[in-house]
Structure formats: structure tokens, C-alpha cells
Image (spheres, rainbow, N blue to C red):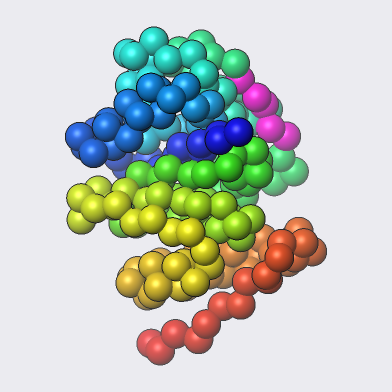
Amino acid sequence: MTKVFIGGSRGVSRLDEPIRMRLDRIIEKGIPVVIGDANGVDKTVQQYLDSKNYLNVEVFCSENGCRNNVGNWKQRKVSATARAGTFDFYATRDRTMADEATVGLMVWDGKSKGTILNVFRLLKQRKKAVVYNVVEKRFYELKALAHWEEFISDCAGELRIKVEQQAAHEDQESGSLSPEPFKPRRVAR
């Protein structure tokens, strides 16, 4: 059964029409949604789903409780070993959602490392990810790690390096149980 992980940048608080149309199709099909509790895309999508009275939603949050659960949906508290409030603390929640979902829909501001890491996490598990770049007002459909290489090569050098370092760090932490360990590329400076 399809289950979609919806996420995105904290700096995005408005949904373009193409995103609303995708959400409407998810609602029409009754596809289960897993979503985080952050401000930005998480909260904005929650508001949209709630405005449509959509109930097939589960909100993932840290063990401290949900920051946003607009529709009072079922919530899943995820335990993290990292210090509260750090990138790794919230990444634990995001990894859990990537594990649970069969596909991802990410709304990206062109800058958020966390959003792009979620795309990578999905692709590592051989799951499709659809990315809407709000700056370009364009969708990218990534179906395999080969698509990841092409997609990430277009990102700014500093962002690409940070994403690749974090992905390698996560592989190392997990013992690289994923099918293909991440191999950072050397980037000319």
C-alpha cells in the first residue's frame, strides 16, 4: 500500500498551486500521509490537509511532543539519542518517516539540507521521491540513486558538500546497512 512522506523546508510557508493539486490527488485516493511537526512546509501542509478535513494523516514528532499537529491527528513520538534541538535530533524523526513511507513528496526552497537528505534517504531504500523546487517552480521525479547524482550535481557546491557529508555520516552511524553505501565525490573548489 502506498504511504507518502510529505516534508520540506522550514522557510516555505505557502503552497503553490501545483503542490495543492498533488495534495488533492493524495486526498482523492485516500493515501496515508506521514508528516513532521516543524514550522514551514510541515505546518502549511497540515493546515491544507486539515482544511480539506483529511483524516488519513500521522504526525511524527520528537519524544518531547508535537510542535504542530493542526488536525489533532494520530501522532508518533520518535526517540532520539542526539541532543534535543540539534540537526541529528530531528533527523532521527525524518529517518523514521522515510522508513515508513513508500514514496516521498518534498517541497524544497533550494537551500534546506534536511529536505534534500530526506530525498536521499528515500532513494537509498529504492523508493521514489518527488521534489518541488519552489524557486524554480518545477517538479523533479527521482526514482533511483542515478537520478540523485544528477539532481545533487546542480546544487550549490557548499550545500552539496554538506548533504554528502551528512549522508556519509548517516551511513557510518547505521553501519551502512543500506543497499549502496554513500560515496562522497570530490568537488573542485
Who's the residue at 27% across and 31% down the image?
20
- Which residue is most to the bottom? 188
Residue 111 counted in the magenta span = no
What quarter of the picture does the C terminus occupy? bottom left
In the rendered image, the vertical position of residue 95 relative to residue 36, given as above or below: below
Who's the residue at 69% across and 46% down the image?
82
Residue 65 visible: yes
Of residues 72 and 21, which is closer to you in this image? 21
Name the spot of residue 26 as percent of width and height, x first.
41, 29
Name the spot of residue 185 as percent of width and height, x first.
52, 82
**Quarter holding residue 113:** bottom left
Q: Is residue 146 left or right of residue 154?
A: right
Who's the residue at 62% across and 71% down the image?
182
Name the spot of residue 87 as percent of width and height, x first.
56, 49
Residue 109 visible: no
Magenta stretch, main secondary structure, is strand
Question: Looking at the image, how many numbered discs can be counted on the residues?
Answer: 0
Of residues 97 and 84, which is closer to you in this image? 97
Q: Is residue 95 left or right of residue 132?
A: right
Name the spot of residue 25 as percent of width and height, x first.
35, 29
Who's the residue at 46% across and 37% down the image?
6
What quarter of the picture does the N terminus occupy? top right
Report the magenta residues as a range. Answer: 75-79
In the rendered image, the vertical position of residue 119 relative to residue 12, given as above or below: below
